[in-house]
Amino acid sequence: MAFLGSHLTSEVGLRLLLWPLGSNIVTRAACCSVGVVLPVYSTFRAIERNNRREEQKWLIYWAAYGSFTLVETFSDKLLSWFPYYYHFKFAFLVWLQLPSTEGAKQIYKNHLRPKLLKHQARVDQLMGFASAELARFISAHHKEFQIFRAIMTKIIGSDAEASGGTEPADPRGLPAIDGPTNPESEDEDY
């Protein structure tokens, strides 16, 4: 009987997702779940298991997803008027992650990597400039940041007291994540 219930639930969910006359709320929620929630958890698992191959897979996914999000930011208002836009977006996000298609890896290898290698010196220069400007801004407004921090600490502290305590520093006794010991020795498998 439990199998029937799970089949019915998945069928209803699939019908809601693919129903052409339905609102975009369901497909937008599905895009968020497939594009962000699932990859965040998968990235977390790869990091916690210290699986270099999975970590690289998800780093490549995030590079492809971030590039897509950058393009979408400027075109979303126009594209969202097209019928089935969110359905196509959902299919694209699934394609990016599927092991059989390796969509994110294809986008990285064929588009992102060549463009970024070509413009790496200029991007590094711009990032250095932006970093220096941000450091100047933060040091110029250091006092305001300290006040903001004190206010947030009081708010969070009073919220933790109201909920009955603080979060454990190390949930389930898991060790802290350490960085790579020798980043030069990592394999370049792309």
Image: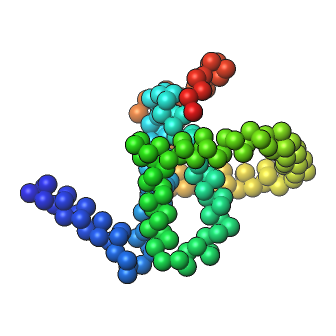
Q: Which residue sits furthest left? A: 1
Decide if residue 121 is on the left or right side of residue 4. right
Point out the image quarter for the C terminus: top right
Q: Position of residue 11 (x, y in %)?
A: 24, 65
Rendered image coloring scheme: rainbow
Q: Is residue 162 above or below residue 46?
A: below
Left or right, 48 with respect to 14, comes to right
**Residue at the image position 64 percent from the left and 53 percent from the top:** 67
Question: Residue 79's image quarter?
Answer: bottom right
Q: Quadrant of the N terminus?
A: bottom left
Front-most of residues 38 and 136: 38
Front in this rendered view, residue 146 or 36: 36
Tell me where residue 108 appears, x and y as whole percent.
60, 43
**The furthest residue to the bottom:** 21
Looking at the image, residue 153 lies above or below residue 121: below
The picture places residue 114, in percent across and down from the top left corner, at 69, 41
- The residue located at (19%, 58%) in the rendering is 6
- Is residue 19 visible in this depiction of the protein? yes
Residue at 45 percent across and 62 percent down: it is 90
Q: How many marks?
A: 0
Residue 39 is at least partly visible in this image: no
Residue sitting farthest toward the front: 110
Residue sitting at x 70%, y 56%: 151
Picture coordinates of residue 132, whole percent (x, y):
88, 44
Answer with the quarter of the image where residue 27 lies.
bottom left
Q: In the rendered view, does 93 fall on the left or right side of 135?
A: left
Q: Is residue 19 above or below residue 35?
A: below
Front residue (pair 46, 110): 110
